[in-house]
Amino acid sequence: MKLGVVGLPNVGKSTLFNAITKAGAESANYPFCTIEPNVGVVDVADERLDKLAALYHTNKIIPAQIEFVDIAGLVKGASEGAGLGNKFLSHIKEVDAIVHVVRVFKNDKIIHVDGSVDPIRDIQTINLELILADIDSATKRLDKIKKQVHGGAADLQTQKEYDLLNKILDLLKNEKPARLLKCDAEEKKIVDGFFLITSKPIIYVANTSDELDEFQLEGIKKIKEIAASENAEVISLCAKTEEELINMPAEDREMFMQELGIDHSGLDKLIVASYHLLGLISFITAGEKEVHAWTIRRGTLAPQAAGKIHTDFERGFIRADVVKYADLITLGDYNACKEKGKIISAGKDYVVQDGDIIVFKFNV
């Protein structure tokens, strides 16, 4: 699962990406520093794994992971090819969700592509370019099926596509993202097949300085208002501080965070929020050999979850013995959970929940 890190040039995208992945993507004070997208895979912070590792006396922890893609900065006119527009749009279509970095801090030494810092204008610039790109895509798709529908030759599926495209275009032409379209599960599958950029879920990252002032606080407030209107999320952090923090030795980092009075960095919060934004959860397998978090989509049934470990597990699925994380930690070990009746014997119709600790039974 991929998240695309996007934003105008010089808003801190590559700095944030460096902090997220420690990948050392080039970060410089000029537009289009990032041309080809950088890709990094990161661990999803999960304190449950550490507690389970202590319980099972194992040092091997395999966390869930998520992939971030640092995409070239976008400018006004990108939907018509300005800047690196075509390259940007082709890359962003390949990701599953968007992390939109918005600069809210002022710094005369860091040039803004539009000459001044205005978070709302910047959001509107990018969102409009994405909307224009989607209008173009949706219109072309609509034109392909229009003759069938008007001529009475369209099947039920084509008619549904036609109706949904018209609803989406109504939204887009009113400068609203396609993700605001209200639809049922069947319609959502059809909409997903349109591969529209603005239908992707989004997190806005308000990139601040290390000390907040009134200008930044007001900017964050306005970003939250925009996010609330389009079913998006907001996280604020200082990308530069996060980059410095992640490059500290672990002991110094922990001490520094204690001085700041924080348990989790802004990056940890962003990574966890991004994971959930994609509709992902983790189930866990645990023992003396290792504690392993496995990534699945919310709503996955037990046999398909078993298939994440090995296809044989799914093919020969018999049942899943499930214990809730809280019960295992409270009672102290698996046998105690068994004695207290806390082990669920789950069949093929069991929907796996986040944090379930599972032993799969199978036969092939």
Image (cartoon, rainbow, N blue to C red):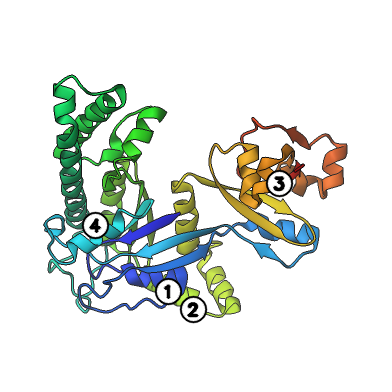
Q: What x and y, as percent, mark residue 302? A: 65, 38
Corner quadrant of residue 9: bottom left
Name the residue at 60% across, 44% down.
Answer: 354
Label 1 element class = helix
Distance CA(mark 1)–CA(mark 4) = 27 Å
| Label 1 Cα crowd, 10 Å radius (few <14 / some 14-19 / many 20+) | many
Q: Which residue is mark 1?
A: 243
Q: Nearer the viewer, residue 163 or 105?
A: 163
Q: Are marks 1 and 3 in contact (CB under 8 Å)?
A: no
Question: Which mark is nearer the camera, 2 or 3?
Answer: 3
Distance CA(mark 3)–CA(mark 4) = 40 Å
Q: Which residue is mark 3?
A: 357
Residue 174 showing in the rendered view: no
| Label 3 Cα crowd, 10 Å radius (few <14 / some 14-19 / many 20+) | many
Question: Which mark is nearer the camera, 3 or 4?
Answer: 4
Q: Tag on residue 335?
A: none
Label 3 element class = strand
Inspect the image, locate mark 2, and give the three-letter code of the amino acid beneath it. Asn
Q: Nearer the viewer, residue 349 or 225?
A: 349
Who comes first in sequence, dot 1 or dot 4? 4
Q: Which residue is mark 2?
A: 247
Q: Quadrant of the N terminus?
A: bottom left
Q: Tag on residue 89?
A: 4
Q: Nearer the viewer, residue 194 or 151?
A: 151
Q: Are marks 2 and 1 in contact (CB under 8 Å)?
A: yes
Name the residue at 46% across, 70% down.
Answer: 21
